[in-house]
Image (spheres, coloured by chain):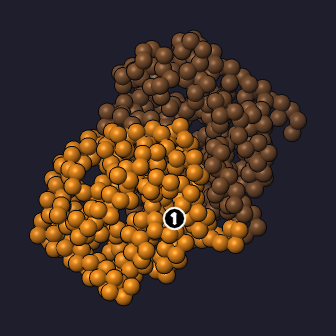
Chain colours: A orange, B brown
Amino acid sequence: MNFTTQLIKKISEKKSILCIGIDMDPDRIEIKSSPTLEDLRKYTLKVIDATLDVAVAYKPNMAFFERWGSKGYQWLEEMLEYIGKDSILICDAKRGDIGNTARQYAISIFDHFGFDAVTVSPYMGSDSISPFIERPEKGVFVLCLTSNPGARELQLLRADGKPVYMNVIKMVKRLNANRNCGLVVGATQGDEIAEVRRESGNLPFLIPGIGAQGGDLEVAVKEGNRDGVAIINVSRSILYAGDQSEGAIRASARNFQEQMNDALFDLRRNL
Amino acid sequence: MNFTTQLIKKISEKKSILCIGIDMDPDRIEIKSSPTLEDLRKYTLKVIDATLDVAVAYKPNMAFFERWGSKGYQWLEEMLEYIGKDSILICDAKRGDIGNTARQYAISIFDHFGFDAVTVSPYMGSDSISPFIERPEKGVFVLCLTSNPGARELQLLRADGKPVYMNVIKMVKRLNANRNCGLVVGATQGDEIAEVRRESGNLPFLIPGIGAQGGDLEVAVKEGNRDGVAIINVSRSILYAGDQSEGAIRASARNFQEQMNDALFDLRRNL
């Protein structure tokens, strides 16, 4: 089954478009002044226990594991095992390299770690993305318009009469023969989500930037899910919610899930 | 001492602008049909022993370690220790993410692994690069014009009257207050190396694409080193040279070093 179909099926099974970003920052955990890797490991298991039936997907961010070197990757291996197969596992890696190297990253991410999907950067062009899209069941979200302020510097340059990110959409549509490609579109971009949706047909979206980064949840859900699916990522506002107890984390995740489902309901009623 | 000054000093000490890319591909080692991680580890020590006085820099490519997961990163940790401090260590990572995440990658690459420099992608803009440039002694090579065919798709789009990669040069010049930024410019781009040099002042270049990828060595050395320094990366043509013995690897590395030094001598005579 191709990735897009799997994603749609999982969304309807779990009644959720919430993706939880696992970016465990030792500076944000309030257990002690400098948490050890073991503290982070335990904290993360708590987050997973609290949210396994609420999230449709988890998106571990490689940087937060890599910062601990080989021990961090061991933690990632064990954590993915713990999450199991009932959620979509997205590797937030933003990789982008020549074909020969991209092939090694694909082996790492899909075979070694067993992720279902990956985020990649388009700067080096389609041959840097090709090794990731060969297997229809594995998904690839290509950076299109990102949620950070610097996004504007390159992505919004006007090239051949339209912004660079529009050229990325065209590239990704061309690469989507296996129906396993999607786009990363930042929630902080407001009106532009609608524009990306119009240009991209029904490519799935992965939308970060909700919560700590300040994107508008209702706009992201509605514009993203018009004529296609969009999953919405939340990291910090769930991971470090309230008193950082399992209850507080679960309540925050449930609250985001409900807000997203309300907006979806609203969208469908008006279609 | 800022990174650019360190690099120039090391080049004149070692009389070499050769950077050796460590991309250990199990499919290319002729020891047995499927080499183990232990085989690769031993083979790599042989490469280092054969070239330690010939290369000015080593550029391990993260993908080829990451494909083995935590065990691959353990190998990388040990290998960097083995190379020691007499060569510039460049992490070929091509990272590019929001500031919060880029900060974790900087901790990984500079603090945990102890690299001297890193390659990054410009697609997400200058705030995705900033966390890497805070320490003057640590270097950052930003992808500008890469050596693969797909480079043309985004990098050569004309934006505001000039190609996207020219906008990257402008961005990197602005970020270079600490004199620790450089550019990745593919050797396969021929004439464009000269154009990048004209636009970028004396930013250091890291030039991949020589050897297996077919770039012209003499052009790369001469155009790259006009008004600035350029180190030239070779991976496969050294790693898997001849009968893959220590002697064959050393001979190939020495041969590249000499060709590069001849071209440099020629350039300086004509300046």
Quadrant housing residue A122: bottom right
Residue named by callout 1: A144
Left or right relative to B160: residue A140: left
Look at label 1 and name its amino acid: Cys
Q: Nearer the viewer, residue A91 or A248?
A: A91
Query: What residue do we see at 37% from left, 44% from top?
Result: A109
Rendering coords of residue B13 (x, y %): 63, 29
Query: What residue do we see at 55% from left, 64% from top?
Result: A169
Q: Is residue B138 visible?
A: no
Rendering coords of residue A172 (x, y %): 53, 59
List the single residue furthest toward the bottom: A270
Q: Nearer the viewer, residue B179 or A164?
A: A164
Q: Chain of mark 1?
A: A
Q: Assign the C terminus of chain B to one quadrant of the image.
A: top right
Rendering coords of residue A34 (x, y %): 22, 55
Q: Nearer the viewer, residue A150 or B53?
A: A150
Dot 1, crowdedness within 10 Å: few (<14), some or many (≥20)? Answer: many
